[in-house]
Amino acid sequence: MTSSADEDARVVAAIKAAGADARCWPNALDEIARALNARFAALLFEDRASALLELKYSTHAEKAWIVEYLRNHRKLDPVKARVLAEIGIGRAFSSEDFVPLKAFHRSSAYQRWMAPFGLADVIGGVIHRSETGVCLFVAFRDERAGVADAGAKMRLGDFLPPLAGAIAHHTPVSDTSALAELFDELTPPVLVVDSKMRIVHRNRSADDMLGEGDALAVVGDTLTVRDPRAKEALERALASVGGADAEAFAIMVKRGESRCCVMHVLPLANGLSALFLRRLEPVADDGGAVAAELFGLTARESSVLLAIAEVGGVPATARALGLSEGTVKGYLKSIFQKTGATRQADLVKLVLALESPFRAPERHSLPA
């Protein structure tokens, strides 16, 4: 195999063109295959969650052969598993790096897929690894070209860096737009923030809560938590997103000496996190209405239930509703019987549990 600066420059230019326009990948892979004295080449992606290989791009003529391998023979390949487990990014390999050539030729994958097509060897390299999976370049040499030698691997090694740069332009980024649409439909305040606490998205309830500016606020585009301990806990949580120890958990936020809300942190992709906020002073209209219908409460029993959940015990409820404490206790007894609850705290939990997480649809008046 001969090489030239002009040929290498043509290959690199083709790779860069593919990085700018994915439709150019078949041509780029054709150029690389010719430079490596290979019959055809492809880019494969293994999804880490499913362990499935997916064909991303291939040369023009041999796509059907590769699809046949992915469907029927990849599990029989003695090279695949070791490549994905052991090979480093940017290092070219051939089959002999992982299995003796005679053993490779005896393998089911070679006998059933490569030999019938007159293929002799595979040469490739890992060009990208991420949380989601591994991207591989592979090229197949036929019997005329023979087994890949050190020169072929050295030449491929020169192409792997520009391949990695081109693939970076097409590395899938998690689309949070669908999540944002869902968050907009939720009643509880929801924020999406990055590791620096910059707000990427917030729903309407979060706007209302941040507008109050007592426990949480926005400075520029950055979330500010006035409770120092809660702020420190949130910073630690956001810093761990993307790491092995990232997990969902809750942070209590105080306003002065009193607890005002709970912040549930849910790690998302690409260094983002969703913050679900729950006020500790419940607004229980929805949950109270559902409870009234579910347990057959009268209008007065329903108002007592809501007041208990909203303002607290019997004395406060009596003052809020303009009733005597004895009357409130009578209604409470009936509510306990109908709901099966035995304590006022259970009633508060019941209302919160029945509160709809979804924002009520907007009602538009019809034009006159």
Image (spheres, rainbow, N blue to C red):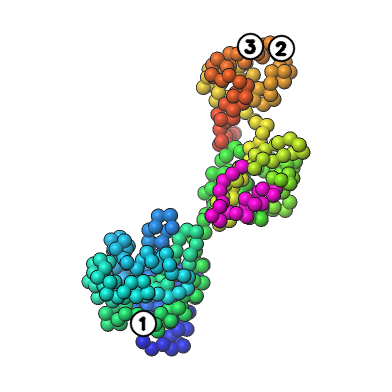
Q: Residue at x 43, y 79 (%)?
A: 156
> Residue 102: x, y in percent?
27, 75
Q: How far apart, in angstroms, are the residues tagged by discs 2 and 1?
A: 94 Å
Q: Nearer the viewer, residue 219 or 143?
A: 143
> Which residue corresponds to the image point at 56% horizontal and 51% vertical from the top-left?
246
Q: Is residue 288 left or right of residue 85?
A: right
- Say which amino acid is labelled 1: Asp
Along the viewing direction, whichever of 172 and 80 lies nearer the viewer: 80
Q: Which residue is mark 2?
A: 324
Residue shown at the point (38%, 58%) measured from the top left: 52
Q: Is residue 301 above or below residue 4?
A: above
Sooner in the amino-acid sequence: mark 1 or mark 3: 1
Picture coordinates of residue 228 (x, y %)? 73, 46
| Label 3 crowd (10 A; few <14 / some 14-19 / many >=20) | few
Q: CA distance from mark 2 to mark 3?
A: 10 Å
Task: Place residue 8 in its image quadrant.
Answer: bottom left
Say which residue label 1 marks: 149
The answer, for residue 300, to whether it is visible in the render is yes
Q: Quadrant of the C terminus?
A: top right
Q: Which residues are magenta?
A: 231-250
The residues tagged by marks 1 and 3 sit, at their Cα atoms, a distance apart of 91 Å
Labels 2, 1: front one: 1
The residue drawn where x is 67% and y is 11% is 327
Viewer can see residue 180 = no
Q: Amino acid at mark 2?
A: Ser
Horizontal arrangement in the rendering, residue 53 relative to residue 202 (left or right): left
Q: How would you rate the neighbour count of disc 2 (Cα within 10 Å): few for under 14, some for 14-19, many for 20 or more?
A: some
